[in-house]
Every structure is written in structure tokens, then in C-alpha cells.
Image (cartoon, rainbow, N blue to C red):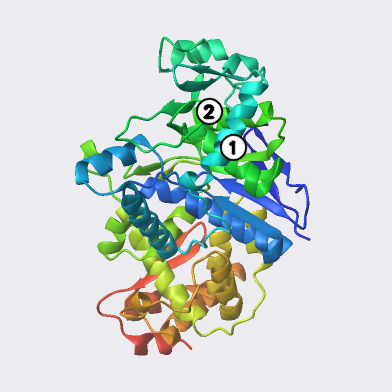
Amino acid sequence: MTDITLYNTAHRRKEPFRPIDPSNVRMYVCGPTVYDRAHLGNARPVVVFDTLYRLLRHVYGADHVTYVRNFTDVDDKINARAAETGRSIREITDETSRWYLDDMAALGALEPDHMPRATEWIAQMVEMIAGLIARGHAYEAEGHVLFRVRSYKDYGALSGRSVDDMIAGARVEVAPYKEDPMDFVLWKPSSDDLPGWDSPWGRGRPGWHIECSAMSFELLGESFDIHGGGNDLQFPHHENEIAQSRCMGHGFANVWMHNEMLQVEGKKMSKSLGNFFTVRDLLDQGIPGEVIRFVFLSTHYRKPMDWTAEKAREAEATLRKWYRLADQGPDGQEVYRPVVNALADDLNTHLALSELHQLAHAGDVGTLRSSMQFLGLMADGIPVWAKEEGPSGEVAALIEDLLADRKRARTEKDFARADAIRDAFAAAGVIVKDTAEGAEWELSPDFDLAKLEALK
């Protein structure tokens, strides 16, 4: 069996992954608040943890992995959107949840095994809140229920902060009913115009943090293997989840994984900078979902990812070539072991793509096809957009064969042969760019196949 190593944020180091039960590997990932289209940054954790989900299924078996990702469908932003539009909250959240799933499917993401909606688990949240009160970790005040942060001695361990430092450096809500500024809301009252549910503390609605603790417990048990999300959730959301769950006596998550944030052309994505866009914006501009996924996979998940138009163009050119090669390959091939090993080393997707480059250069089309499918890049054969223009599979295969021939000639110091291939590429209109991963190429408008075939 493949040995998997993952970086555990809680311990700040890479560790061998040892599931609690190899026959029931369990993962929870924080999902979206559904009030609008998902922006590009929202999509990064989806691709990251979809890739991990695929790896776990490959190693432990598809029937032995349970992946949960929630929908937050009770939130002040949703309430505001309903007030602005005059539409019902359920209508808005049904629509935006469907948008989200459609857009993520366009990126090649598999749907999780469970996708709980917060509003359908209110009773379980109320039960957990009552349990925290009974244990002295929460208290009622003016219709609110708040978690008593200082009652959990390890609060701040995930993010590496002390409570006093957090108070000094963080923006915390100061309210007269709080015992301590760091205490956070588990339940809050609802006015007649807001969604609410009956509870021992009056009509109200849950705070954001309690939903993940309650739903993960119900669907995955007291302890589970992996909890993931963007690093912007590390504090306070994940810190609060840990405190709630541990104070209920739950082991909660063994491994914590966080992806870094996304930039656009070297800058933080922002509406004020004019570089803010949704996944749907890119899809509607004609950028294929596979291209978006490829760009995401090109950067390790623990590094900031910079989305650029140039990266998208390069990804599309590479995928066009790979699709034409892989489309000639048979189904049912084994996934290339170095690709699996790359992912098993803390999801090294950059290295995995480098291995695909090697497969393409070697002309191993069957293994290239299965390995692309493993990475979520070729679910249903060659996509329509890749057939519309560009070189045929035969031309792509010829160029890759010649590139492999050139590489062999260089290794064997047959410089005359290597130079002849280089000159033939130039004469035929094949633009070759050598990179650390291998050679990239594209065809110029005056491409002449006959000049290339003369080298065969």
C-alpha cells in the first residue's frame, strides 16, 4: 500500500498518515456560504481536497473513504441578499448551492459523499450547545449563548496564539453580555423578519462555528482523520470548532490541513482593484474548467497561488497536446506510480504534473490517459474545446517522439542529431521552449508538417 505523508497544521510538520480505521477513512472540509457565485479563491480548497479525496480513494478504495463538505445556508449575508431581492432565503440558497456544484463540477471536482446543509441540522446544534452549557463551557446571556473561551486551556494551539495576544491584536466583538471579549456566539436571537428556530433560549439561529462541530460529529463520529479548509479559516473558525468539540469530549480531527490563498497577477483579489472574478466569469470567458484546475495543480497547496492569464494560456496549450496524445490511449491502464507517489508526498501536485510531462514526452499514451484521469483532468475523454483547433493527435505524437529523440541525442552527446531536430523544428514552425519539467511546444501559423516528417 502507498504510504501517504501530509503536513499537519496542528503539529507544524509533515507526518505519516495513519487513518483511525483504514476501512473507513473520514475527511471533513469547510464548504461555502451560499449567497452568490463562488469566486476563484473559493475554488482552490475544492480542487486541493478533491485531489486528496482521489488519492485516498485510490489507496484505500472508493468504498472506504467518506468525504463531507457542508453548505452554510443560514448567515447574515444570505439574510441581506433576501432583503435586497425580495426572494425567499430557501430560494436563494437552493439556487446558489446548485451554481456552486455546477461550477465545481466544471473544474473536475467529484461531489463529496455528504453535503449537509446547516439548516437541516439545527436540532443537533441545539443539543450540542445544551451539552456545552451543562459542562460549564457555555452560558446564556440576553437571549444569546456564548462559548466560554478560557474554559478550554488549549485554545489557540492550532494557530499558535495565546488568548491574551488574540485580544490585543484581533478585532473582537465587544458586547455587554459577554463575560470575556474572546467569548464567541453559539446561538443568537432572531427578530420576526429573520430566520429562526425554537430553542431553550428562545427563537434564534446558530452561530457559524457550531455547525461544523455538530455536523462532523453526526456524520463522521467523535473522532475522524482529516479536517481541511483555507488558511483564512484557521483562526477563529477552526480554533473555535476544536474548542467546542473537545469540550464535548470529542477527539475531533487528527490531521488539520490548510491551503494558502490565491492572488491574481501578483495582487490580492479585490473588487476595488478590478481583479475579482468568479469561476463562472472565467468559464463564460471561454476558459475551460480543466485549464483552471491545471493552473491550480501547478502550485503546491501550501504556497500562495498566483492566477495569471499567461499561466492559463500555457495550461491550455499543454492540455491540448496531452488530450490529443491521451485520446489515442486505451482505457484501464494503471496510474503512473510516480504520479501517485508525488501526491502521496503531501499532495505535491506540481511534481505530479511534471511526471505527466515525462509520460507525454515518452509517448506512453495509455498511462498518460489514466494518470490524467486520476488528477481529474480527463473524466470523459477528450473535451470538445480541445478538438476545435490545434495539432492532431498524430502531429502531437510525432513532435513528442522527436523531442524524446532530441533528449536521447543530447544524453548520448550526439549533438549533430540534436541540432538537426532543433533546426527541423524551426524550419517546420514548431516553437519549442525548454523548461525544468521538460520541453513545451506550440505551432506557429506557418507550420509545415512535411518538413517535420522528413526527420522520421
**Residue denoted by label 1:** 213
Query: Mark 1 is on which residue type?
Result: Ser
Label 2 sits on residue: 200
**Front residue of this view, candidates 48 and 407:** 48
Q: Quadrant of residue 290?
A: bottom left
Instruction: Answer whether labels 2 and 1 touch (C-beta < 8 Å).
Output: no
At a point 40% along the width and 64% down the height, the residue shown is 106
* Above or below: residue 314 compared with residue 275: below
Percent of width and height locating residue 371 = 59, 70
Q: Quadrant of the N terminus?
A: bottom right
Give the number of marks: 2
Q: Residue at x 30, y 81 (%)?
A: 447
Q: Nearer the viewer, residue 430 or 296?
A: 296
Looking at the picture, does residue 239 appear above or below residue 179? below
Percent of width and height locating residue 139: 56, 18
Is 335 in front, or is 136?
136
Q: Secondary structure at mark 1?
A: helix
Apparent side of residue 347 relative to residue 91 in the rendered image (left or right): right
User: Is residue 98 rendered to the left or right of residue 248?
Assistant: left
- Estimate the x, y position of residue 198 in percent, counting from the top left: 47, 34
Q: Nearer the viewer, mark 2 or mark 1?
A: 2
In the image, is residue 61 above or below residue 158?
below
- The residue type indicated by label 2 comes to Pro
Query: Which of the 4 image quadrants contains residue 176?
Result: top left
User: Percent position (x, y) of residue 249?
Assistant: 72, 30
**Between 285 and 448, which is closer to the camera in this rendering?**
285
Horizontal side of residue 218 vs 431, given as left or right: right
Circle nearer the N terminus (2, 1)? 2
Circle 2 — which element? Answer: loop
Residue at 21% x, 36% y: name it: 272
Residue 7 seen in render: yes
